[in-house]
Amino acid sequence: MTKTITTVCFAVLVTIPASACRADDRLPSEALRSVKKICPEVLRHPMVVAIGNLSGKGFQDVAAIVNCKSTEYGERQDEELIVLYGQQGGSYKIAYRSEVWPWNGRSEKELEIKNKILAFSEHCAYNCNPESWASSYKFKMRNNDLILAGEDHSSTFMSGKKFELEETSGNSVNYLTQKVIYWKKTRRQGYSEKRHAFKLKAPLSLSNFNLETCIINGFCMPTSVSMPRP
């Protein structure tokens, strides 16, 4: 069984299949115990959780975006992505821990584990007018490492006196095929795209993933890829 998009309501771990909160779908206590060893403050803030078979070993694995540090006023300070592999007997072992990035209160995040792929998505949730944006990152197992397989970004800008003009643009990067698509869509000109190939020096492990780097550079691997521009 694969558990898909999950999140939490309050400062307790609750997994849900959609937007409604279900207190009966709790994170396994053994997984929580493992996270608390490296992140004692994990229960102070809501977090995002997904459960499913990611490693391919037949056990339920867990992915979670957690806040491990708080400011002196008790506000969230940073975030990181943690993956735990389920073990025989019901225990959990931390397999991957991403780099830490600053917490962004304007965005909402989701996780999904499906078909042995971990999908992490983020979108603008507050003060997004006249521009909104969304990004997603997919991780797959390759050569016994969970690597970034692809990323997608889009932004929508509304203009005009009544915000009646919409322009959407973005890019889609596939690190497995080493191809990137830049696309644009407007009401007046319709859809257009440009496709380019690039060379990848080395894949990016989830352990080296940093969301802030992805946002600042426009894609996640500025040192491993000479990404062609549109």
Image (tube, helix red, strand yellow):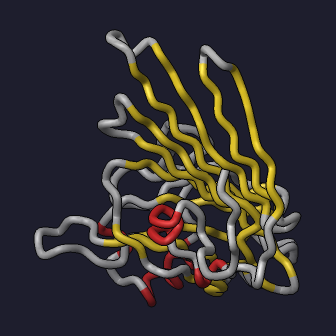
- Point 68% across, 80% down: residue: 224
Find residue 108 and report its horizontal and vertical position in percent: 44, 48
- Point 67% across, 50% down: residue: 230
Residue 46 sits in quarter:
bottom left
Find residue 191 and report its horizontal and vertical position in percent: 72, 26
206 is higher (above) or lower (below) than 170: below
- Front in this rendered view, residue 40 or 82: 82
- Does residue 53 appear in this view? no
- Point 69% across, 73% down: residue: 226
- Does residue 21 appear in this view? yes
Find residue 154 and report its horizontal and vertical position in percent: 58, 42
79 is higher (above) or lower (below) than 19: below
118 is higher (above) or lower (below) than 109: below
- Point 59% across, 63% down: residue: 219
Q: How many marks?
A: 0
Residue 104 sits in quarter:
bottom left
Quadrant of the drawing holding the N terminus: bottom right
**As drawn, which residue projects farthest toward the left?**
73
Left of 91 or right of it: where is 167?
A: left
- Front in this rendered view, residue 220 or 121: 220
Left of 136 or right of it: where is 163?
A: left
Find residue 117 and report its horizontal and vertical position in percent: 78, 62
